[in-house]
């Protein structure tokens, strides 16, 4: 049985186009806040924080080269797949940050975002 796998950009990354500046992904930071507030729930899924530069080999291996934007929640087989999940072959995933937050609540017991 596979588990859900959450792929995020590492907070505080650098962008070669802006030397000396550090950034956070505006789509990942809300998810990071939820994870930080409830670390005990993180054992229910696999979480990976990836470097900013592309190509992103981990994402390419999990999805493909055309879907490297993050965040992404790759859905395991421990829960029903929602109807709005995207598909690449047999892999089902969600890449909308708001929807990922909803699914973390539904599938893993995180508090709902209101």
Image (cartoon, rainbow, N blue to C red):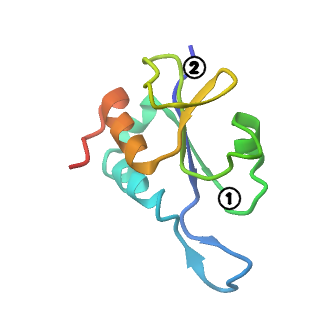
Position of residue 97 measured from the top left corner of the image (x, y, whole percent)? 44, 50
Position of residue 109 measured from the top left corner of the image (x, y, whole percent)? 30, 31
Kindly identify the residue that appears in the image at 50 percent across and 31 percent down.
85
Q: For the residue labelled by badge 2, is the local secondary structure a helix, a strand or a loop?
A: loop
Kindly identify the residue that appears in the image at 53 percent across and 28 percent down.
75
Q: Is residue 82 left or right of residue 64?
A: left
Kindly identify the residue that appears in the image at 48 percent across and 56 percent down.
28
Q: Which residue is mark 1?
A: 51
Position of residue 44 measured from the top left corner of the image (x, y, whole percent)? 43, 29
Bin the neighbour count of mark 2 within 10 Å (Cα to Cα): few under 14, some 14-19, many 20 and up. Answer: few
Q: Which residue is mark 2?
A: 2
Kindly identify the residue that appears in the image at 44 percent across and 60 percent down.
29
Q: Is residue 90 left or right of residue 23?
A: right
55, above or below 103, in the image: below
Q: Are marks 2 and 1 in contact (CB under 8 Å)?
A: no
Query: Mark 1 or mark 2, which is nearer the start of the sequence?
Result: 2
């Amino acid at each position: 049985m596979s588990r859900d796998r959450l792929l995020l950009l590492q907070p505080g990354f650098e962008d070669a186009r802006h030397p000396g500046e550090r950034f956070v992904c505006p789509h990942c930071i809300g998810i990071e806040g939820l994870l930080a507030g409830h670390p005990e729930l993180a054992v229910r899924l696999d979480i990976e924080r990836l470097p900013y530069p592309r190509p992103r080999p981990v994402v390419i291996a999990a999805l493909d080269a055309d879907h490297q934007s993050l965040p992404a929640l790759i859905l395991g087989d421990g829960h029903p797949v929602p109807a709005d999940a995207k598909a690449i072959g047999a892999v089902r995933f969600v890449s909308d940050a708001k929807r990922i937050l909803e699914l973390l609540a539904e599938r893993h017991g995180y508090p709902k975002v209101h």
